[in-house]
Amino acid sequence: MTTTADVDPLVARMRPFGTTIFAEMSALAVRTGAVNLGQGFPDTDGPPEMLAAAAEALRTGQNQYPPGPGIPALRAAVAAHQRRFWGLEYDPDGEIVVTAGATEAVAAAILGLCEPGDEVVCFEPYYDSYAASIALAGAVRRPVTLRPAADGRYAFDPAALRAAFGPRTRLVLLNSPHNPTGKVFTPAELALIAELCREHGAYAVTDEVYEHLVFTDAASGHLPLATLPGMRERTLRISSAGKTFSCTGWKVGWVSGPAALVSAVLRVKQFLTFVNAAPLQPAVAVALALPDDYFADFRAGMQARRDQLVAGLAEAGFQVLAPEGTYFVTADVTALGGRDGVEFCRSLPERCGVVAVPTQVFYDDAEAGRRLVRFAFCKRPEVLTEAVTRLRGLPANAAG
């Protein structure tokens, strides 16, 4: 006889999603004492002006529910920041809403815009929450695969992108700079995406949390899709404080766009977290107004760490795909005898005391990323040095 205990109570659309790879690998790092280059969080705090503003807000009673769209000062700071860096104009009252990080923003956008059966075009490999959010909405993902090109940069087949669009296409989910590949989409690629959105009447949801982490040797700088002709009125632009200001645990993000689209996000968000991070919102407003030197120094420091890890991984025997932006380096494990990234990463802590993340879990087409792994370089230089020292012992060991 079958009992309720024998039946998985989880709804069918969420059964493919187990414990995230980040949780698994971080737990492995704790258990083995390994250097954790798996999950993308810094090991230093953000700018002191921001931290002081948060402490002041805590002390002065800013600890109750903030307004649903976010405090006025933060919405105004987001608007000023986007005008300053990207030339985009948004009304703080109606075209910006504060969210519990970019992850909630993506989920609320998809849930607010997609009916069951609608299709979402996205680029794989993709951050794992994308697939889960699409599934929660009952929508269908249409992945377009990014592959390393001859110049070592990732690219997609334009014909494959055109083929992914159809009569049920509701939106395009775009992450640039892109996690996990570090790709920065070029103006020509963005123009094609914009053309297809206009042709099919599709919306765009753009995850731009790494907007200030485009390195000086990238093929092009960061260009928000919303700046292209006809795209502001059909684009929800997402960013957050976590990456730019090294405060990933604060979970303060925002969505900008035309009022009707932002309203759809807010109507969903109010039944997810309702509101969030009251005393941290004024601190993020302070951070967004920091002088240009902060953003330039932040990028330069992260680029130096990227170069340090890229060089170290190459010395250890990996085939490295140097990123144009973000926190992450992708490497091929084939030269070290690796055949499967998941097996390689699960064995790596015991073999040399370092944790990475297998990239194949971010693909629908797992074979496209079977031998790729991702390392995070948003760590102190001495931590990267220790990790590289440990990884240099790999060639002498049996591969995972």
Image: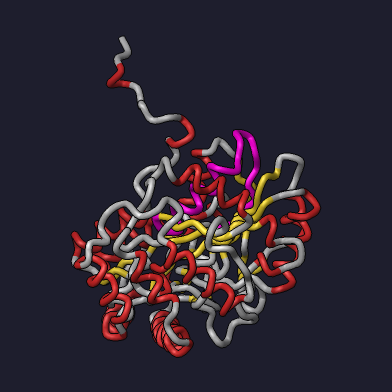
Is residue 353 found left or right of 205 in the rendered image?
left
Q: Position of residue 238 (x, y in %)?
A: 53, 61
At x 33%, y 69%, the residue is 247
Using the image, determine if residue 187 lies above or below residue 258.
below
Going by the picture, which residue comes out furthest to the top? 1
The image quadrant that residue 177 belongs to is bottom right
Q: Nearer the viewer, residue 387 or 338?
A: 387
At x 31%, y 54%, the residue is 23
**Magenta part of the chain:** 100-124
Going by the picture, which residue comes out furthest to the right? 199
At x 56%, y 60%, the residue is 256
Using the image, determine if residue 55 lies above or below residue 261.
below
Using the image, determine if residue 329 lies above or below residue 167.
below
Q: Position of residue 28 (x, y in %)?
A: 25, 58
Q: Nearer the viewer, residue 5 or 249?
A: 249
Q: Is residue 64 magenta?
A: no
**Res. 341 in view:** no
Q: Quadrant of the N terminus?
A: top left
Q: Nearer the viewer, residue 359 or 288?
A: 288
Is residue 34 found left or right of 100 in the rendered image?
left
Q: Position of residue 115 (x, y in %)?
A: 61, 36
In the rendered view, how is the structure colored? secondary structure
At x 42%, y 57%, the residue is 70
Q: Position of residue 120 (x, y in %)?
A: 63, 47
